[in-house]
Image: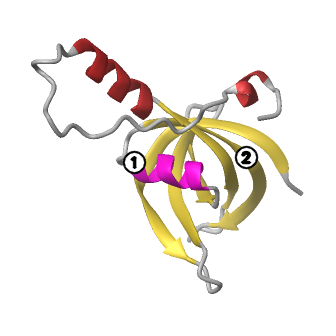
Amino acid sequence: MSIEALILGKLHQKAEQRTSKSGKPFVTAKARAASGDGESLFVNVIAFSESACAALLALEAGDSLAMAGTLKPGAWVDREGNARPSVDLVVAKVLTVYGLKKKREASTQSPEQQPLESAPVVEFEQDHAWLAGGDA
């Protein structure tokens, strides 16, 4: 069973870029989302699209993010024999404050204050229709 989902949370550890056996790049990460009972739920994240991969790789552990994609719920058993929920998310879209933060920083500096070789502003998502439930 898989479910279309929007997960809000924080990146638990820095994302890692990997390469499949066929030579295609993908990114894996682990995110932490608050569950309704006040505890955290860890989400195993995998991204294949170039924009989602770039967005995840630009973040550091602890950065906030929103991810939309296909969720697959599951369970695992801990050392004490207790069943624990597991969640895997194949990410289609990632929304972060990273691009917005860089734009704001760049726009608040006068031309004299801007470094000659400043890092380019990275825009990860051009169309945010998926946030309102539309198709991107």
**Which image quadrant: the N terminus?**
bottom right
Q: Residue at 10% of width from left, 18% of height from top?
A: 112
At label 2, which amino acid type do we have?
Gly
Magenta-drawn stretch contains 54 = yes
Q: Nearer the viewer, residue 2 or 76?
A: 2
Q: Relative to 68, is 19 on the left or the right?
A: left
Q: Nearer the viewer, residue 4 or 22?
A: 22
According to the picture, the residue beneath numbered tag 2 turns out to be: 69
Q: Position of residue 110 (x, y in %)?
A: 17, 13
At label 1, which amino acid type do we have?
Ala
Question: Is the stretch drawn in magenta largely helix, strand or loop?
Answer: helix
Secondary structure, mark 2, is: strand
**Which image quadrant: the C terminus?**
top right
Q: Relative to 48, is 111 on the left or the right?
A: left
Q: Residues within 10 Å of mark 2 (few under 14, many from 20)?
A: many
Which span is picked out in magenta?
50-58
20 lies above or below 98: below
Rendering quarter of residue 132: top right
Q: Residue at 57% of width from left, 66% of height from top?
A: 26
Quick one: label 2 or label 1, which is nearer the N terminus? 1
Secondary structure, mark 1, is: helix
Mark 1 and mark 2 in contact (Cβ < 8 Å)? no
Magenta-drawn stretch contains 41 = no
According to the picture, the residue beneath numbered tag 1 turns out to be: 58
Q: Residue at 51% of width from left, 58% of height from top?
A: 29
